Image (cartoon, rainbow, N blue to C red):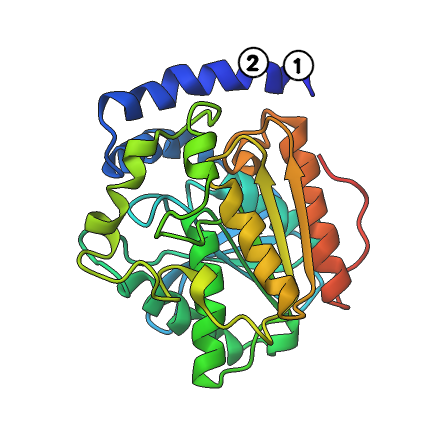
Amino acid sequence: MSLQLFFIDPLLRFQVKRRFKKNPDLMTLRAIMVAQEPMNSKLPADITAQQIELGGVPVEKLTATGAETSGAFLYIHGGGWVGGSPRTHRPLTRRLAAQTGMAVYAVDYRLAPEHVFPAGLDDCVAAYRALLEKVPAHQIVVGGDSAGGNLTLALALRLKAEGVALPAALVCLSPATDLAATGGSRVTNAKRDALFVEAMMHTVEPRYFPGGNAQNPYISPLYGDVAGLPPTFFHVGDTEMLLDDSLRMADKMRAAAVPVTIKVWPRVPHVWHLLADLLPEARQAIYEVVAFVHVHLRNVPTLEKAS
């Protein structure tokens, strides 16, 4: 464990978890992410950001100077379906662009509660379909974190049901896969989780899918027919409330003969990848994502370990 990680846990508990204890509403996450955006949105000189549309959906396209590969990484940000944006996730997406040499398309999907399910998922489907007109499916990776990991898996299930060509691979970072909250880690890790409190989880349904069925596979991919989905990569921390969401989803996919790579990291916070400017563990985790992408997209070059 790095010295930086040693100090991050108490810092997050003081700055973030304390706010959720005072106001355990999913909308608190939006306020936290809005406050963090100015710090997270900085880009280095070798990364270019373009604001474009795919299928009528706003998308931020990040490309690295000298990028030569033709592949594409469709990235779906997290934020509890109510917060976040492509700008909040630049500490991760800019590194994916730089280290893979691929264009990263970060989807700025509609957020709840103003736009409840399935609006955000519909946007992701529309963006992917439009991307297919530019890049063949076998050169596309789709990935996301937390709620974005949920949407990544739900998108794959939708594409399969609609007969659309599936991407080459999926990347899920601390995804929420079971909004019915039947995993034991929601309770057993409630105190260990550096960010969230258990009471907040009960506000997901009225904010994101009011009156909906939590076992709808497009809301909770754990309940979907996962046979035939692309190779899938999972990262999750062992202290996260969402630990079982990854473990159980990975087990289900393996049982359906889907190639799965999963790593459970010790003591890291939820989606620690976003702390790559501070944590060596985050930079190593991103490199592992890049290595997975390299395996499944032949046109992505082998890269030196990046900072």
How many marks the image carries: the answer is 2
Q: Is residue 61 left or right of residue 276?
A: left
Residue topped by disc 1: 3
Camera sees residue 174 = no
Real-space Cα separation, disc 1 to disc 2, in angstroms: 7 Å
Which of 5/200 is in front?
200
Q: Quick check: 285 above or below 67?
A: above
> Which structural element holds mark 1?
helix
The residue shown at (42%, 47%) is: 78
Q: Nearer the viewer, residue 103 or 82?
A: 82
Horizontal and vertical percent for residue 92?
55, 42
In the rendered image, the vertical position of residue 98 relative to residue 124, given as above or below: above
Where in the figure is residue 66, as x and y percent of width and height?
70, 55
- Do the CB atoms of the residues marked 1 and 2 lie less than 8 Å apart? yes
When asked about the image quadrant of residue 275, the answer is top right
| Residue 209 placement: quadrant | bottom left
**Residue 135 percent across, percent down from the top left:** 58, 75
Asked whether the viewer can see residue 211, the reply is yes
Q: Which residue is disc 2 drawn over?
A: 7
**Is residue 151 left or right of 43 when viewed as pictured?**
left
Residue 46 vertical position relative to residue 229 in the rendered view, above or below: above
* Residue 171 x/y as whole percent: 59, 56
Q: Residue at x 54, y 56 (%)?
A: 249
Quadrant holding the N terminus: top right
Look at 81% across and 44% down and name the residue there: 304
Q: Amino acid at mark 1?
A: Leu
Q: Residue furthest bottom?
A: 163
